[in-house]
Image (cartoon, helix red, strand yellow):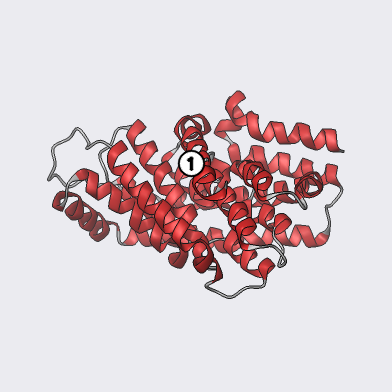
Amino acid sequence: MTVLLLILLFAVLLGPFLFSFAERQLELYLFTLGIGAVFIAGNWNKALLHTVVTDPIAITCAVLLAGWLFRVFQQPFSQSISFAERLMPSRVFVALIVISIGLVASFITAIIAAVLLVSIISLLDYDRRTQIRLVILSCYAIGLGAVLTPLGEPLSTIATSRLDESFFYLFNLLGSDVITAILLLGIITGIVIAPPHVKRGKEKKLEKESWTAIIIRSVKVYIFVMALSLLGTGFEPLLSPALEGKSPTFLYWTNMISAVLDNATLASIELGPTMDEPTIRAILMGLLISGGMLIPGNIPNIIAAGKLSITSKEWARFGFPFGLIAMIVYFFVVVY
């Protein structure tokens, strides 16, 4: 069983980079591997089926609702973004996008923040390379900001529950780390993202997204979340013995695996109410930072990549090295 699960884990990690069909149909590819992992591990049951089918419903409805709202209010939203872009220098504007969307993610949820991000990015006249970098840096900010309250994302909900703590526990524990990181991401964005090579002051008009496109994106998100749940459950027998009782440093670096697995599942395996706060911080920050490295690592990545047709290779080209540098910096500044 262990050997087969390891083979599947490598298929999850490398498949989207080696096979074009896996990259084009990432949701179905991961869903298929997830089913395989669950059956190999022997933990398929009716309760899991219920969880896998029902858990993505709220996320899918949020994506569908956000798509509908943007379709309805597209014109005034577009005008507001265009006005703000004309009002301030380009580098300040993109820095504020990253900072503001990261800070509000824990209250409006990571999903809605990601949909708003995609809507804003679609209105900006950046070349594809620059657009992808802006999306990745923003998704890092959303992933970090969403952990501050149980409303933000499944990871924060599970962490608060597993630790048996209050609503603002994660804000008190990680607030300074997360807010500092979001501010730094904003500054980095202002440096990295050069102004677009177009004439300013011209309002960009977007074609109204079709209902078909909105529904297809929502279905893809549903399948993706199902796939992540299956993968997390299927790989639990492999990961749980390897992670249980390990040092904060070991867990911090091992949690880079959350770049391709559901970080909420890893949190449920690793966290416990008897842990000290330095260990909890190391675990959670390792999960949060590495979650931005690849598309499957976080729901905002999935939504943004799907809407803007960003491939796994395009994301990894910038997202992985940036995340690795962030992991190293945070480790030596805070964890070590």
Left or right of 152 on screen, residue 120:
left
Q: Secondary structure at mark 1?
A: helix
Is residue 209 visible to us here? no
Q: Quadrant of residue 16?
A: top right
Measured as percent of width and height from the top left, residue 282 is found at 60, 52
At 19% from the left and 32% from the top, the residue drawn is: 197
Pick the residue in front: 44 or 268. Answer: 268
Measured as percent of width and height from the top left, residue 193 is found at 29, 38
Q: Please tell me whether residue 171 is drawn above or below residue 123 in the rendered image.
A: below
Measured as percent of width and height from the top left, residue 319 is found at 47, 36
| Residue bearing the label numbered 1 | 329
Pick the residue in front: 249 or 218. Answer: 249
- Identify the residue at the far bottom of this view: 166
- Identify the residue at the far front of this view: 336
At 20% from the left and 50% from the top, the residue drawn is: 85
Q: Quadrant of residue 50?
A: bottom right
Measured as percent of width and height from the top left, residue 104 is found at 40, 63
Pick the residue in front: 167 or 97. Answer: 167
Q: Please tell me whether residue 243 is drawn above or below residue 276 in the rendered image.
A: above
Left or right of 195 on screen, residue 39:
right
